[in-house]
Amino acid sequence: MSHVHFSIDPEAIMKHVRYLAEDIGPRLAGSENEQKGADYIEAQMKAIGLQNVEQQHFNCRWYDVNTARMDAKFGEEWQSVTMDAVAHSPSTDGVLEAELVYVETAKPEILERLDLKGKVALVHGTYGANSSQLKMLAEKEIAAVIWTDVRYTPPWNLLVGLPFTFQHLLTFPAASVPHPVEWELVRQGVDRVRLELDTVVETRTSQNVVGELPGKNSHGGVLISGHHDSVRGCSGAEDNAAGVGVALAIADAMKDVDLEKGIKFVSFGTEEQLSQGSFAFVDEEKNNATDTELVLNVDGQGCWAGENEIFVTGSAELHEYMYDEPDGFSDHFPFIAKGVPAGWFHRRNCAGGRWFHHSIHDNVDALSPQVLASCAGLVAGIAHDVCTNGELPFEREFSDETRAAVKAVADGWLKP
Ligand SMILES: [Zn+2]
């Protein structure tokens, strides 16, 4: 592929990242801070001169945690352990003291033979790629569940959350512990815990922020996206103020280009509940999402040491055109579920993804401005190529194989 090379100033990206991650801070879906982030992005889009700038609102589930603590009985001694509430967990009724049962990965064949009524289940991993574990735990009438996000094994808390399609199935209190805590609970044969969760869950409003650089032709074109929400208690610099910063810097760098086809820029809300904002966007008729010829989504980009990856979903030609990598999961997914080709620009530094992901360590220091600038240059070049040429440089239709692979993922996540 030969794209025009756009040279993008790292500082043009970082000023947005710092504002979102440091001046505003954590931007949990449905919170005032998420709205502040959206207002900032809207103002920036207008200042750049994008057209049809607006916020599109939708309902989401906001939550907060007043109390989250757990004591475990090591031998004869009760000790508090590092833990957190799972997003949208119901409260316990005061302090819940119960038997702790290690259920490993909580596969159906493991849960089947266990009596878990009134007990706390400790799971190696989280709820899995579909709703079957959640349903089974509820049927077992467990008192609570404790999950571990084993993609990473640091000693600090990782925020575990559920997709918006599964949240109604979380009818029992749920907490998460870091893997080293799971390890010690199992190694020392802990069989009793006291868990206290005091949480609130409310329906609130989230928002997508949309703006465009129009082309001569009102059909087709590219959509460049990031998301402005973050997980709770995390400044979300890399996940994903960086993606928003990249999108805004590209918009600014391309504002004077003569475009045949338009470029839409979208900052999604509520990505952290499995792309609820992006689903709302593709479902909104006036957005005409399926007219888009290519989605370029930047999420989880910019870490210092690591390797770039592009998850490409589309035709064989698109893979070749962009880079050859398998499928993935972020705000491009609602588009590919509707047959719109997409690339997700990501950068990993460990097998599980990024060592600081969804923790307090996701801050501005985790980001390399230069890495972000080169990602922005690449995305801008692809958008330029697609939107200044009459002919699409790749076959737009998915192969049957790709369509089936996308459907398999959608069936797991979206059919509670
Ligand atoms: Zn993200």
Image (cartoon, rainbow, N blue to C red):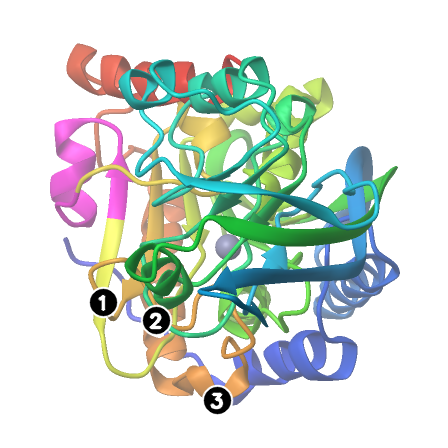
> Which element type, helix, strand or loop, lies under badge 2?
loop
> Which element type, helix, strand or loop, lies under badge 1?
loop
Q: Is disc 3's CB within 8 Å of ligand 1?
A: no
Position of 339 relative to 177 (above/below) = above
Which residue in the protein does label 1 denote? Answer: 350
Dividing the picture into quadrants, the one containing residue 69 is bottom right
- Please rate how many residues cluster around mark 1, counting C-alpha atoms within 10 Å: few if below 14, some from 14 to 19, many from 20: few
N-term mark: 2 or 3: 2
Q: Position of residue 222 (x, y in %)?
A: 46, 41
Which residue in the protein does label 3 denote? Answer: 365
Q: What's under tag 3, amino acid-wise?
A: Asp
312 on left or right of 280: left
128 on left or right of 61: left
N-term mark: 3 or 1: 1
Which residue in the protein does label 2 denote? Answer: 355
- Residue range of the region highlighted in magenta in the rendering: 311-325
Q: Position of residue 235 (x, y in %)?
A: 63, 73
